[in-house]
Amino acid sequence: MSETRQPIKTFTADSLPVRVYASEADMATDVAQTVHDYLVEAIASQGEAAAILATGNSQIQFLQTLVDLGGVDWSKMTLFHMDEYLGVDENHSACFRRYMRERVESKVNPKAFHYLGGDAPEPIAECERYEALLKAQAIDLCCMGVGENGHIAFNDPPVANFEDERLVKIVELDVACRLQQVNEGHFPDLEAVPKYALTLTVPALCSAKKVVCVAPESRKAKAVQAMLEGPVSTDCPASFLRTQSQAALFVDADSTRLLEKF
């Protein structure tokens, strides 16, 4: 890798190593290489591996870079995603299953990609079905982002529970979260954004042997500041990663511009 793709700064917030890059492109290159190397090693030592992947605009460059790198035997990978809107069908432009199908599954053909059906006729049963799949499979890696309100997956501040006994649940979406979906161009207005979603819980995400959190762009600066410099609290669910020694945060100069302590 070229020198420019190395972090311009590294530090640790409680137990969480943080790597800051000059640009999102540099960050995406380094995190993709990190994930690539980890998966190659996991498959070599275990014969297979499993990962949970995040959707969202902030993940596009990283996922594209990872797919383009090659070298991962995806036929030995079982993949999950972490959330889906309640009632949205798989062809909707904002559907996370569609996002994963187009950006990941169709390009790498994994052994399996387990999808969470937001339009399942019985959503509670769908949560239970997905939870059983997660329980049956050791998760090697979770790649996540951070919402503008500090959420991880769809664990918004009002519904996040660091000690949740469930792995998958139905949640009501915060207005700030729904507005982010409008501002990112996924829905025409707030009314069009579903009010509920299915999500993996915080303990489900953190059950992975390795957690990689990717949070570039200036619109994530407030969330990154709260995550790293505020209290560990459901007021900013992503702050929980500071207690997780298996996690690492990858950010850029834009998303860390409000930091004062580091």
Image (cartoon, helix red, strand yellow):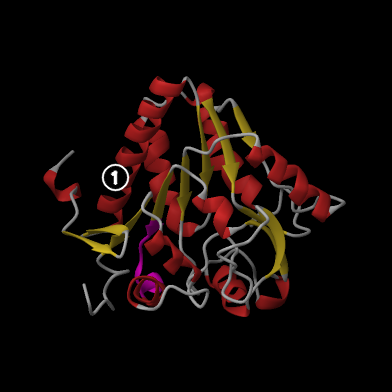
In reply to whether residue 218 is colored magenta, the answer given is yes
Q: In this view, does 109 lie above or below 19?
A: above
- Residue at point 40%, 32% (across, down): 39
Graded by Cα atoms within 10 Å as few (under 14), some (14 to 19) or many (20 or more), the crowding at tag 1 reads many
Quadrant containing the N terminus in the rendered view: top left
Q: Is residue 240 above or below residue 128?
A: below
Q: Which residue lies furthest to the right in this view?
A: 121
The image position of residue 64, as x and y in percent, is 42, 42
Q: Residue furthest left?
A: 3
The residue tagged 1 is: 29
Q: Nearer the viewer, residue 189 or 111?
A: 111
Q: In this view, does 86 lie to the left or right of 98?
A: right
Type of amino acid at the residue the image marks with label 1: Thr
The image position of residue 85, as x and y in percent, is 70, 59
Q: In this view, does 62 lie above or below 216?
A: above
In reply to whether residue 44 is colored magenta, the answer given is no
Quadrant containing the C terminus in the rendered view: bottom left
Tell me the magenta residue range: 214-221
Q: Which of 165 and 240 is in front in this view?
A: 165
| Secondary structure category for the residue under label 1 | helix
Q: In this view, does 169 lie to the left or right of 61?
A: right
Q: Is residue 100 above or below residue 255?
A: above
Q: In this view, does 22 lie to the left or right of 237?
A: left
**Residue 17 lies in quadrant:** bottom left
